[in-house]
């Protein structure tokens, strides 16, 4: 067993899971299911998994560029002044995701880890082993609301510090762990500087814009950012999240409803502007990925935009084909959370988005609504080649990854 293979936790009898339970025990059935289906020989790339970066916030703030902000942040954590991690803007909705403590791993993973290896490396390896994943693309969690921070410079300071810390402490340790680096989108000049600094760093396979923000993606200020990514052959991802204080969601009185709508709404707005303002025509080689909004919204938006465009084409003069064609041919989507309550609707959805080439598997581990690779493998209407493409080969092509499976099941 090589150094990158985490040791298996001792098999435990059926027990109640708490925040200290080993990831491999939480996911024991997932691991057995992957083996049962013979996924050992399939390339599986998890394009969206998460860690709780605030656990290591005392390390991360040491990477802040500005000396005054860095000093304040380090002093804050040294003195243990309490409250949220320094610099972050929170969202009360985060307190609802663990369903009153009934899904404890959503709130925190406090399991023991081996000395000598960074905690995030160990936890990521354990998840990869249990899920049967060859590559895992890691995203932050609380930082996904930074796009709404009242101080735009804080997104710059913290986003760039996060990128440096993640590369130094996690990505450099294991080549199977990747990231779409945080792009401080609210300050276009800083977004460009971020691309210049991090595009060639180990483990960086593209860049991510957290979607909960009010900046229009079609603004001319971002055209150089898109050109820089297109020239480098790197994709841009729009990672959805929710924000209950958004005025459009203010009347929703259940977290269930806000969560269902919020993760979709932000990407629907950005996608509408992305397509109708002709970004795929202006940057035909730029690949965009739409993350963690599920799939059910895509057929709706395709039909709605097509219907309106056919009546008012003069308002989208850059388009040379229907909006749905750009959404199907120029955009990539991640599976999670894949809506499976109506299999006929799901089959039609996958057909409409050309899933065999445009869909990427994502687990969203360790969030409460995470999916397993088996969700794709067990779909009866997909060919084996389509399943292999969705589970890993599409990602290997998109991110220029070695398509040879390297998992340790």
Image: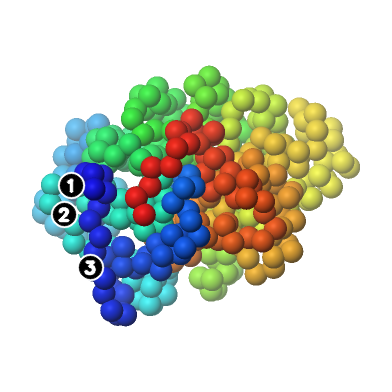
> Looking at the image, what colour scheme do you see?
rainbow
The quadrant of the rendering that contains the C terminus is bottom left
Q: Which mark is residue 117?
A: 1
Say left or right for 389 vs 178: right
The image shows residue 244, relative to residue 18, as above or below, that is above
The image shows residue 270, relative to residue 196, as above or below, that is below
Q: Which residue is under mark 3?
A: 10
- Identify the residue at horizontal 25%, vertical 38% (top origin): 173
| Label 2 close to label 1 by CB (< 8 Å) | yes
> Disc 2 and disc 1: Cα gap in Å?
6 Å
Label 2: element kind: loop
x, y percent for residue 380? 67, 61
Residue 307 visible, this orientation: yes
Say left or right for 279 vs 250: right
Q: Which mark is residue 228?
A: none
- The mark nearer the N terminus, 3 or 2, is 3
- The mark nearer the N terminus, 1 or 3, is 3
Crowd class of label 2 (few under 14; some 14 to 19; many from 20; radius 10 Å): few
Which is nearer the eye, 48 or 301?
Answer: 48
x, y percent for residue 222? 54, 28
Say left or right for 252 vs 350: left
> Disc 1 and disc 3: Cα gap in Å?
20 Å
- Identify the residue at horizontal 74%, vertical 49% (top origin): 352
């Amino acid at each position: 067993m090589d150094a990158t293979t985490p040791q298996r936790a001792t098999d435990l009898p059926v027990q109640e899971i708490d925040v200290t339970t080993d990831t491999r025990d939480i996911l024991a059935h997932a691991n057995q299911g992957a083996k049962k289906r013979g996924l050992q020989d399939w390339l599986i790339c998890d394009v969206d998994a998460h860690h709780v970066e605030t656990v290591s916030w005392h390390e991360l703030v040491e990477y802040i560029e500005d000396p005054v902000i860095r000093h304040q942040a380090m002093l804050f954590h040294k003195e243990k002044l309490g409250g949220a991690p320094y610099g972050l803007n929170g969202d009360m909705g985060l307190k609802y995701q663990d369903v009153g403590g009934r899904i404890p791993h959503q709130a925190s993973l406090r399991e023991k880890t081996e000395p000598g290896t960074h905690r995030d490396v160990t936890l990521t390896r354990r998840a990869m082993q249990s899920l049967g994943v060859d590559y895992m693309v890691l995203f932050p969690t609380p930082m996904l609301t930074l796009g709404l921070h009242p101080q735009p410079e804080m997104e710059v300071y913290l986003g760039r510090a996060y990128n440096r810390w993640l590369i130094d402490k996690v990505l450099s340790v294991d080549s199977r762990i990747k990231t779409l680096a945080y792009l401080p989108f609210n300050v276009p000049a800083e977004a460009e500087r971020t691309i210049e600094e991090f595009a060639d760093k180990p483990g960086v396979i593209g860049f991510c814009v957290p979607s909960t923000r009010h900046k229009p993606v079609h603004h001319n200020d971002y055209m150089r950012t898109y050109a820089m990514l297109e020239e480098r052959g790197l994709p841009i991802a729009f990672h959805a999240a929710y924000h209950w204080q958004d005025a459009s969601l203010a009347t929703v009185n259940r977290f269930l409803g806000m969560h269902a709508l919020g993760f979709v709404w932000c990407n629907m707005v950005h996608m509408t502007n992305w397509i109708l303002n002709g970004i795929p025509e202006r940057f035909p080689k730029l690949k965009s990925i739409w993350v963690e909004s599920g799939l059910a919204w895509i057929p709706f938006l395709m039909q709605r935009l097509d219907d309106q465009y056919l009546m008012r084409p003069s308002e989208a003069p850059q388009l040379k084909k229907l909006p749905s064609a750009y959404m199907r041919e120029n955009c990539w989507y991640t599976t999670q959370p894949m809506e499976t309550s109506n299999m006929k609707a799901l089959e039609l959805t996958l057909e409409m988005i050309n899933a065999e080439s445009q869909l990427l598997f994502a687990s969203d581990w360790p969030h409460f609504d995470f999916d397993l690779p088996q969700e794709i493998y067990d779909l009866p209407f997909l060919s084996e080649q389509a399943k292999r493409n969705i589970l890993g080969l599409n990602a290997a092509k998109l991110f220029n990854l070695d398509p040879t499976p390297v998992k340790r099941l």
